[in-house]
Amino acid sequence: MKKGEIRWYKFAFGETGILTNQKCFIIPVDNLYLLTVLNFKIATLWFRSTLLLLCGSFFRWKHQYMGSIPIFPVTYAQKTPIIERTRVIFADPESPYVPRLEAEIYNF
């Protein structure tokens, strides 16, 4: 995996060069806004209504579905506060401020 790629499933941001031994899709961009949107609860609702559900309640991630995720275009000014809060969460995911930051992100 190249630095700055986003990996599907539990959407994470990778900068360490870690490889996966499972089927996954990689978005070859360094885009914290997209990462945050993919982790929104509304995205999970879309996944549940669109993706096939396998045994064990796992989604079947297929290219034909993943290419049609409705990511609405936003301006730089609209996504900047979301990215800033995401960076703070990444810096200290165990911080007691994380729930408040997540709530702020979801309210944008």
Image (tube, rainbow, N blue to C red):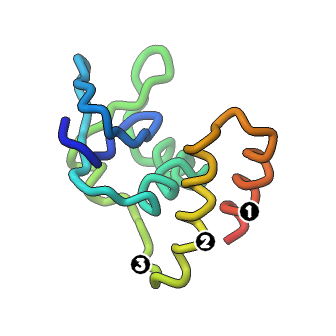
> What secondary structure is marked by label 2?
helix
**In the drawing, does residue 6 fall left or right of residue 100?**
left
Foreground disc of the pair 2, 3 = 2
Image quarter where the C terminus lies is bottom right
| Mark 1 vs 2, N-terminal side | 2
Q: Quadrant of the N terminus?
A: top left
Question: Taking 24 as reference, is 75 left or right?
Answer: right
Residue denoted by label 3: 73
Note whether 72 is above or below 46 in the view shown. below
Q: Residue at x 80, y 52 (%)?
A: 100
Question: Mark 1 = which residue?
Answer: 104
What residue does disc 2 label? 81
Label 1 amino acid? Answer: Glu
Residue 10 position, x and y percent, is 47, 35
Q: Give the mark nearest the N terminus, 1 or 3.
A: 3
**Marks 1 and 2 close (CB-CB < 8 Å):** yes
Q: CA distance from mark 2 to mark 3?
A: 15 Å
